[in-house]
Image: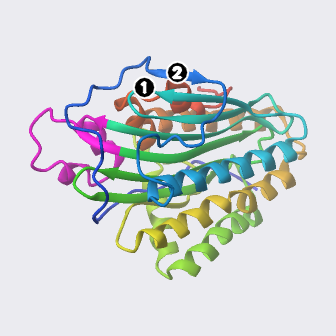
Amino acid sequence: MYKLALLAASASALSRPATKLSATATAPAPTWDDHVAIDAPPETLCKGLDGNDSMRRKFEVMLRAAQNKITSAVEELDGEGTFKQDVWERENGGGGISRVMSGGKVFEKAGVSLSVVYGSMPQEALASATERGVDRAAGMKPGERVPFFACGLSSVMHPRNPMAPTMHFNYRYFETDGGVWWFGGGTDITPAYLFEEDMKHFHGTYKEICDKHDPEYYAKFKKWADEYFVIKHRGETRGLGGIFFDDQNNKDPDTHFAFSEECVNAVTEAYLPVVAKRKDSPFTEKEKEWQLMRRGRYVEFNLVYDRGTVFGLKTGGRIESILMSLPETARWE
């Protein structure tokens, strides 16, 4: 068992034809108060877009099923905590389903948030959404907004016991005007204390999936994770990585979809058995303080470097969903 510093991932891309987006470059900019709470999830958050056979709708359906599966499994493991659900719509297009567990027996905080947003975004938001944001905005006039569609499921889970690691995942599908589309995602783990058998289980689960889909995926996506989750101002990495991929569109859309679907559904298999093994481990006050210090580093990365956080803030995202990843308690010295 060893104390950890921290680890990570990056991105790259291609393009392929897609249905033209209904948003225009002159659509109004999103505001910070255009998220309206509603009582129950609608049949679809892709209102006014394509039919059920479109990739937009297909990806939403898949992520909603994954959200149900993961939150049910987490509640079962926790034994006491339950997820509070908030459903919202975005006046400029789309909406979301946010589920947050706070004050559980096993999990101090766990969130699983689905968002479907579309409309237009500033060019600088595109740069934060993808590593190829600059060339994708080539030819646009200064200040011209970019029509877009984005659907994603994000999660961060912070266990109480410092021997149990924090876990994060995000799986997403993007489109911009001009027939550009891509898939992105990843799952990564951040232990405060290292148990090698736990890391072998976590990484082994995703290596098996990667190898099934493409023998080059695991080495490539693990390297991306190691390079992306870097706290540059600290000279540290965040956690022990996992997989991370972005700008993926060099294969048939259904092929990328199948990989994303298998990865997001493997979260329960890769992560929850590790928490189940460590949730009742004895620990000292000093070990708890170390966990809180690691959480402080986690907060720094998420607020300064995380691509999803930056994208959400630049597109007028729902603040509660953007900051869902932050732990309830952290420490700095």
Disc ID at residue 236: none
| Bounds of the magenta segment | 120-148
Disc 2: CA contacts within 10 A as few (<14), some (14-19) or many (>=20) = few
Q: Position of residue 18 (x, y in %)?
A: 31, 60
Q: Position of residue 214 (x, y in %)?
A: 50, 80
Identify the secondary structure beneath mark 1: loop
Identity of the amino acid at label 1? Glu
Residue 146 among those drawn in magenta = yes
Residue at x 19% of width, y 31% of height: 26
In this rendering, is residue 261 above or below 215? above
Drawn side of residue 175 relative to residue 1, left or right: left
Residue 274 among those drawn in magenta = no
The tag earlier along the polypeptide, 1 or 2, is 2
Identify the secondary structure beneath mark 2: strand
Q: Which residue is mark 1?
A: 91
Judge whether residue 226 can be spotted in this image. Answer: no
Cβ–Cβ below 8 Å for labels 1 and 2?
yes
Figure quadrant of the N terminus: bottom right
Identity of the amino acid at label 2? Val
Q: Position of residue 169 (x, y in %)?
A: 58, 51
Tally of numbered tags:
2
Q: Position of residue 172 (x, y in %)?
A: 48, 52
Q: How far separated are the C-alphas under marks 1 and 2?
A: 7 Å
Drawn side of residue 207 relative to residue 185, left or right: right
Between residue 310 and residue 317, name the one nearer to us.
317
Residue at x 34% of width, y 25% of height: 30
Judge whether residue 268 can be spotted in this image. Answer: yes
- Locate residue 298: give its quadrant: top right
Disc 1: CA contacts within 10 A as few (<14), some (14-19) or many (>=20) = some
Drawn side of residue 159 relative to residue 38, left or right: right
Residue at x 58% of width, y 53% of height: 61
Q: Which residue is mark 2?
A: 36
